[in-house]
Amino acid sequence: MELPLKIVKEVEEYIKNNKIDKKRAEKIWERVREAYSNAVYDPEEPIGVVTAQSLSEPATQMTMRTYHFAGTAGIQVTLGLPRLIEIFDAKKEPETPSMTIYLKKDYQTKEKAMRIAEDIKEIKLKDLVISTTIDLINMTITCKLDMNKLRRYNIKPEELAKKIKLKNLEITTKEDRLIAVSTKEDVINLHKLKFRMLESHIKGVKGVTHVILSKNEKGEWVITTLGSNLKKVFDIEGVDATRTYTNNIFEVYEVLGIEAARNVIIREAMKTIEEQGLGVDVRYVSLLADLMTVTGKIRGIGRYGIAGNKDSVLARAAFEETKKHIINASVKGAKDPLKGPIENIILNQVIPLGTGAFKLVGRIGKKGK
């Protein structure tokens, strides 16, 4: 039986740290495999119920109720119950998307790492402007540019006019000033154009607002970001695409596929649970991640995801929107196969799990034989 990667790593680390010889190591591996095989559930065991109980209590009733942020390399990332809700409800955009970007061996110097970090951070026009003035008579917006920052980011003033692409706005540059003239004589529209102009993307990776450069425990230079754009980061020279990671599950799904997204669901959920000091077996989280991704797409747990798409009418009705499901089933003449525990409990029948999964037929012998 193949052991999970987490267990393999822990055993390997234990053998290495204690300098155990090959013969003893083989016996340790045998004991670990035996213990793991004994922990695997049996056919017809109500593993769904056990998983639900094992996840719901730690996740909702214990320390997870606190809403807070935890610092990671100086960047605030949402953890605790809010993060678990994001993961299991399959929220498209996390509240604080973040990337951990690893660099290739040839780029493991501070100068090269800083250059890559500067290439990644998104630069907007507002980052290059000292002050902004609106002339309501001539319908113009004048921005005074920070020439030191322009030189630092290697941007020429005349390039800005080409980078800012907005309708109803003609842009020119003159020395250290950027002048935008509105083609529409509308004061409200002018204020909107000013905001959109200052938010215009000039350089870097869109969505990455902050970057922190630091060394990890192995002495490698690692870039941590606030904001995520995995596809664009992979295209940057020097980035190790095999190890670079994002906490945005849907982004991983779009770039690397459903299997990678499943692994991120498990990793993010376990990290959040363990950060709270709680112990939940990884196999329960794996089972839930399998259920969320089994169709090839990421589905949340709620009424518009797994719970709302069950085959059983009664199981759907027992979760939420009871009247809607019963009426729809009546109109369509739907049938319920009664294969799950929920619908059989509702009808006061034996559930098809455990001893209720079998129908035994046999001859009862006569007394005395």
Image (cartoon, helix red, strand yellow):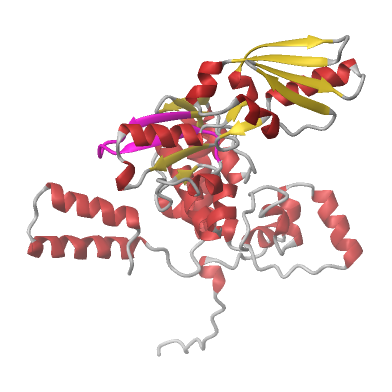
Image quarter hosting the N terminus: bottom left
In-front residue for pair 340/277 = 277
Q: Which residue lies at the image location 84% right of the left edge and 56% below the top edge?
A: 326
Residue 218 colored magenta?
yes
Residue 231 position in % (x across, y down): 55, 49
- Magenta-tinted stretch: 211-228
Quarter of the image with the C terminus in it: bottom left
Among the 4 quarters of the image, the one containing residue 150: top right
* Image position, residue 351 (x, y; %): 61, 64
Residue, x 91% and y 23% (percent of image)?
A: 184
For this view, does 39 lie left or right of residue 289? left
142 above or below 27? above
Judged left or right of residue 369, residue 353 is right
Q: Count the marks.
A: 0
Q: Residue at x 14, y 65 (%)?
A: 26
Q: Position of residue 347 (x, y in %)?
A: 72, 61
Vertical relation: 48 (above or below) 112: below
The quarter holding residue 360 reads bottom right
